[in-house]
């Protein structure tokens, strides 16, 4: 069953590391209308931060490209977030989703991005094609304040 979209936003920005915080705060502000708990909104902020950081660090590496976010509020207070880059893509998604796996050669990354996203969200899917980019789709049910 397809859920009705109650609200939607689209955001596009360059893959500068400073924009990671902008994306995180923008997503949390957008979802505020459904009155999530502090923990629920923190989960979304963390997952968005990880996804955008992956685009910057792994998708574009030392290049600058665009990152697009589509955020939707679906009926039943479900947050839908799609984060897309047109960077180098992922040749082996299953391997990339393993904890501790990273393509970063500087030893500054722990390789936990997808594991973190998965732990904070109810749904996570990754679609990617080498040299075409990566799309991450996440969902989270907000139960809100009682």
Image (cartoon, helix red, strand yellow):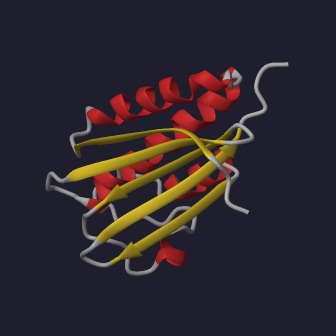
- Residue 7: horizontal and vertical position, in percent? 53, 36
List the single residue furthest toward the left. 63
Q: Quadrant of the C terminus?
A: top right
What residue is at 50 percent from the left and 67 percent from the top? 126
Residue at the farthest right position: 146
Task: Name the residue at 15% across, 51% down.
Answer: 64
Residue 42 vertical position relative to residue 61 in the rendered view, above or below? above
Q: Is residue 77 left or right of residue 42?
A: right
Residue 106 in the figure: left or right of residue 25: left
Q: Position of residue 41 (x, y in %)?
A: 61, 29
Q: Is residue 47 above or below residue 138?
A: above
Using the image as rendered, state which of residue 20 and residue 79 is in the foreground.
Answer: 79
Q: Quadrant of residue 31?
A: top right
Camera-side residue: 102 or 114? 114
Number of numbered discs on residues: 0
Quadrant position of the N terminus in the picture: bottom right
- Could you say which is closer to the camera, residue 35 or residue 41? 35
Asked where in the image residue 105 lies, by quadrant, the reply is: bottom left
Q: Is residue 12 left or right of residue 138?
A: left
In the image: residue 138, left or right of residue 146? left
Task: Give me the residue at 57% from left, 68% from top.
Answer: 98
User: Where does residue 102 sit, x and y in percent of width and height?
Assistant: 42, 64
């Amino acid at each position: 069953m397809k859920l009705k979209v109650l609200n939607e936003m689209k955001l596009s920005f360059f893959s500068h590391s400073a924009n990671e915080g902008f994306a995180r705060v923008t997503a949390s502000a957008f979802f505020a209308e459904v009155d999530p708990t502090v923990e629920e909104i923190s989960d979304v902020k963390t997952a968005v931060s990880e996804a955008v950081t992956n685009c910057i660090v792994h998708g574009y590496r030392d290049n600058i490209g665009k990152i697009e976010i589509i955020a939707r509020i679906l009926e039943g207070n479900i947050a839908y977030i799609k984060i897309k880059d047109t960077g180098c893509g992922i040749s082996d998604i299953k391997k990339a989703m393993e904890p501790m796996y990273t393509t970063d050669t500087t030893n500054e990354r722990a390789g936990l991005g997808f594991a973190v996203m998965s732990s904070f969200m109810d749904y996570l899917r990754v679609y990617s094609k080498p040299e075409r980019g990566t799309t991450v789709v996440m969902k989270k049910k907000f139960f809100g304040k009682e």
